Image (spheres, rainbow, N blue to C red):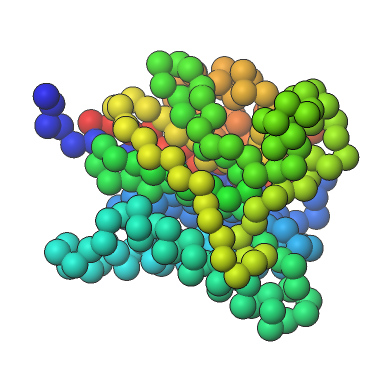
Amino acid sequence: MSTAVVHYTAAALTDRGRKRPSNEDAFGYSVEDGVFVVCDGMGGAAAGEIASSLAVDEMLRLLAARSAGPQVTQAPLLQIAEEAIGIANEAIFTRAQRNYRLNGMGTTMVVLVAEESRLWVLNIGDSRCYRLRDHQLEQLTLDHSLVEEQVRLGRMTRAEALRSPLRNVITRALGTQKKITPDIFPLDVVPGDRYLLCSDGLTRELTDAQIEALLVGEGPLEEQCDRLVTAANRAGGNDNITCILVQAEI
Ligand code: CA
């Protein structure tokens, strides 16, 4: 057995796209704290921006506090991540309750937390996490959206889902109710794995095959992020586009 320690490098990019007047996506990450997060806000421009940036800030703050604390008193990373999501949810919910202009604001969240070769992905809403391993792209998360749930139940085809007027309806969002439960995906990391966290502004414009083709090419992670955003804009850029790439290495 190799005892080499897995470490991570990352790059990210967000873009308003070509049609929207503002950018309601937010992202943040800390390689040191092992946290990477993408949020896609909703509820009107100002509200959406507040919800998504509040969620990102809370996650980074709470995960950084973990790294700063003494090792012996630390709760497991997954537990801390789940608690952080609960706190972020309440922060958005409370703020929306206090200000009628922010009523109904919310955000998706996809977050990856990593500790050496253990990694967890947690998600709420339709922002996604993919893994590229052996040149093959695999979607790890399941969208909490009305049409995706219909597809999973066999009541709608994928082609119908893409055209449906209800395709924007998400069934779980951070900040819209008092309690929230994320999906949790525990994963074993293999050196060489690359993880993509992204908002739907990327995945609505590009197929999984197109994303895979763009990621299989070599080059720095920053360039790869740029390739993804450029391709999504060329395909229409109908929404805000955000991606984080996380590379596992030894
Ligand atoms: Ca979006």
Asked whether 50 or 94 is in front, the reply is: 94
Q: Is residue 117 above or below residue 24?
A: above
Q: Position of residue 26 (x, y in %)?
A: 59, 55
Specify the farthest residue to the bottom: 98
Residue 163 in sight: yes
Q: Position of residue 202 (x, y in %)?
A: 66, 36
**Residue at position x 60%, y 31% from top?**
228
Q: Quadrant of residue 211?
A: top right
Q: Quadrant of residue 80?
A: bottom left
Q: Quadrant of the C terminus?
A: top left
**Residue at position x 23%, y 68% from top?**
69
Q: Is residue 203 above or below residue 78?
A: above
Asked whether 45 or 71 is in front, the reply is: 71
Q: Quadrant of the N terminus?
A: top left
Asked whether 105 or 157 is in front, the reply is: 157
Q: Position of residue 157 (x, y in %)?
A: 77, 23
Asked whether 1 or 15 is in front, the reply is: 1
Residue 46 in sight: no
Q: Quadrant of residue 243?
A: top right
**Residue at position x 43%, y 64% from top?**
84
Q: Position of residue 49 (x, y in %)?
A: 67, 63
Apparent side of residue 140 relative to residue 72 in the rendered image (left or right): right
Count of all numbered marks drawn on residues in the image = 0
Q: Is residue 7 above or below residue 101?
A: above
**Residue at position x 51%, y 46% from top?**
183
